[in-house]
């Protein structure tokens, strides 16, 4: 049986994530009042305040149930009783009150930021009606010596199988964020690493929403449709058409029909992938995880430009945003040495009642050395 030691710096858990969420919530209310736009639930089918806790509870079940069955052994006499007893033991050891507080605190802060972000993003076309797509397209061509980046990628990779492949990359990315949040809040026992990641994603959203308002764009797929007319129909093309219909309906109804989700600068696809890559690098996850993350980062960059979701300058801005989010979140969560972001491990968990080598008879609170894989069991 283990007693989970907690000796954290003075700042409350997820302080910056809460600040980002509350800041976006204030922007949502201000824009709603100024533009007379209703504030809406971003998830019309299954509300996010139900869906995201359900994801976390499902992840908890996946954490506890397999361990219970493995520890209970093979079915036999008294097996049901062993299952019940083992379940209580595993739940108590894996989910003390401190970890329940950690996971629930993180998911609530994250959902507040997500819901406010979706509303601010939807309101951006009303708040700032000018569009900067032509300026960003010109800048792209300047960077590519007069060539269009998307057309260049179409020439390099073709417009057949590559379109389906990059569409699949986009689909995987959509699932990646909620899954990674669940991992950071549920499966990790290095809570400083989990708090760092969740806070960094919250900062990504907060900064991204502000940029959507300051530099409104729709992206090449809408502002330069001819370049993408030769691509085959994929999930992405159907999604793009659906998102445009939502935008038109939202603008025509002045926000009464729902939320629109189109905004290109900066690319949060790239920004959040940069955040993921830097976090897995800084918390020293397994080498194959780091290689996979950076590989998927490269594929995300190619996919967003190839499919027309973003200009290349959106990619540059997104990468910078994601890197800054990791740094500032590291400072805010105490994961730093001076002004350099670095994981500061949680205090070691010790057997309840065990003595510290320095102070016999007292519980050990000495921090453990940095583990090879701090964010995994």
Image (cartoon, rainbow, N blue to C red):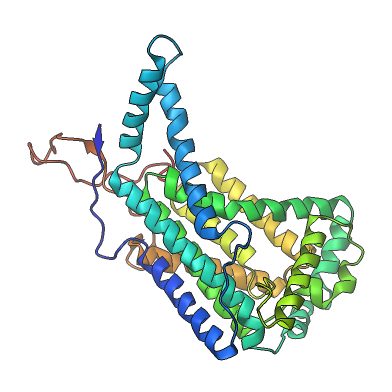
The answer to whether residue 287 shows anywhere in this view is yes
- Where residue 264 sits: x, y (%)? 68, 73
In the picture, measured across the screen, residue 234 lies left or right of residue 363, that is right
* Residue at the spot 57% in from the left edge and 55% down from the top edge: 177
Q: Position of residue 318 (x, y in %)?
A: 61, 69
Identify the residue at image location x=85%, y=59%: 156
- The answer to whether residue 323 of the structure is visible from this angle is no
- Quarter containing the N terminus: top left
Left-right relation of 358 to 216? left
Task: Check the image and report above or below for 207 versus 279.
Answer: below
Which image quarter is the C terminus in?
A: top left
Which percent across, then down, holds residue 167? Answer: 77, 55
The quadrant where residue 229 appears: bottom right
Q: Residue at x 67, y 74 (%)?
A: 263
The residue furthest right is 230
Question: Residue shown at 80%/74% (left/top)?
Answer: 222
Quarter of the figure with residue 374: top left
* Between 311 and 4, the one nearer to me in the picture: 4
- Asked if residue 268 lies left or right of residue 103, the reply is right
């Amino acid at each position: 049986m283990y007693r989970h030691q907690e000796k954290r710096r003075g700042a409350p858990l997820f302080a910056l994530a809460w600040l980002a969420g509350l800041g976006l919530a204030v922007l949502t209310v201000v824009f709603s009042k100024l533009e007379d736009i209703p504030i809406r639930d971003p998830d019309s089918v299954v509300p996010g305040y139900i869906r995201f806790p359900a994801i976390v509870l499902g992840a908890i079940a996946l954490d506890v149930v397999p361990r219970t069955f493995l520890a209970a052994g093979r079915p036999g006499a008294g097996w049901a009783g062993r299952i019940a007893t083992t379940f209580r033991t595993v739940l108590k050891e894996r989910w003390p009150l401190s970890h329940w507080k950690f996971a629930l605190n993180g998911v609530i802060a994250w959902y507040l930021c997500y819901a406010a972000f979706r509303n601010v993003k939807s309101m951006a076309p009303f708040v700032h009606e000018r569009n900067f797509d032509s300026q960003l397209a010109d800048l792209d061509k300047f960077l590519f010596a007069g060539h269009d980046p998307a057309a260049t990628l179409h020439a390099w990779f073709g417009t057949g199988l590559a379109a389906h492949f990059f569409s699949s990359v986009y689909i995987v990315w959509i699932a990646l964020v909620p899954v990674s949040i669940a991992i950071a809040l549920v499966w990790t026992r290095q809570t400083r690493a989990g708090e760092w990641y969740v806070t960094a994603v919250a900062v990504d959203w907060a900064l991204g929403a502000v940029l959507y308002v300051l530099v409104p764009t729709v992206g090449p797929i809408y502002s330069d449709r001819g370049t993408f007319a030769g691509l085959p129909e994929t999930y992405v093309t159907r999604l793009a058409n659906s998102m445009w219909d939502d935008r038109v309906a939202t603008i025509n109804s002045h926000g009464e029909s729902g939320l629109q989700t189109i905004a290109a600068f900066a690319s949060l696809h790239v920004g959040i992938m940069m955040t993921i890559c830097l976090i897995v690098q800084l918390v020293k996850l397994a080498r194959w995880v780091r290689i996979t993350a950076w590989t998927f980062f490269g594929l995300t960059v190619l996919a967003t430009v190839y499919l027309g979701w973003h200009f290349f300058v959106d990619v540059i801005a997104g990468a910078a945003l994601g890197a800054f989010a990791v740094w500032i979140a590291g400072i805010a969560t105490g994961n730093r040495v001076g002004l350099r972001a670095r994981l500061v491990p949680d205090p070691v968990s010790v057997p309840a009642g065990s003595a510290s080598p320095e102070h016999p008879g007292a519980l050990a609170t000495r921090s453990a050395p940095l583990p090879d894989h701090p964010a995994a069991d």
